[in-house]
Amino acid sequence: MISPQVARTRRETGEPTPMSYEMLRDFGNRVAEQYGLVFTLPEELQQIYTKFGIDLPAGNGDGTWRLPVPARLVIDREGIIQAVDADPDYTRRPEPAQTVAVLRTLLAR
């Protein structure tokens, strides 16, 4: 997982166990930006986030309301993107089986 967050959120700190996967930090969304996967939260959503106590500019450490589009990329050993699943609606995620199928195809080469 890659995230622009520099600090764990309140929701994360309430978790009893640490994450079971490695979290890479993308300070300033630099990596996501290179893939064209960054957007700025609209003003009306910024206000809603603020009402819920979500300080995205502080959490990201860059003073912005920019977020990466949730995406899953499969990149082969030569650095070529073999599959992309990206959707700005964070509630719609690709099935893990889709990614596994792409990985199996790559391994069979």
Image (tube, helix red, strand yellow):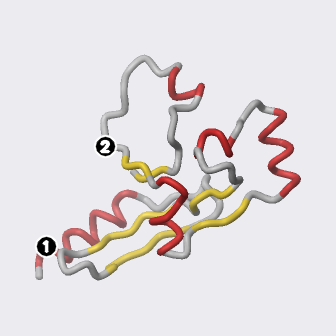
Instruction: In the rendered view, tell whether residue 80 sits above or below residue 27.
Output: below
Number of numbered discs visible in the structure rendering: 2
Report the front residue among 57 and 91. 57
Q: Residue 89, image x and y in percent?
A: 65, 60
Q: Quadrant of residue 37?
A: bottom right
Q: Residue 23, image x and y in percent?
A: 37, 44
Report the front residue among 106 and 48. 48
Query: Can you name the residue that lies furthest to the front here?
Result: 62
Task: Give the secondary structure at mark 1.
Answer: helix
Q: Earlier in the sequence, mark 1 or mark 2?
A: 2
Q: Tell us which disc is closer to us: 1 or 2.
A: 2
Instruction: In the rendered view, tell whether residue 99 sits above or below residue 83.
Output: above
At 50% from the left and 66% from the top, the residue drawn is 32
Q: Residues within 10 Å of mark 2 (few under 14, many from 20)?
A: few
At 58% from the left and 44% from the top, the residue drawn is 61
Residue receiving disc 1 = 107
Three-letter amino acid code at the position of disc 1: Leu
At 53% from the left and 60% from the top, the residue drawn is 29
Left or right of residue 16: residue 45:
right
Q: Residues within 10 Å of mark 1 (few under 14, many from 20)?
A: few
Left or right of residue 19: residue 28:
right
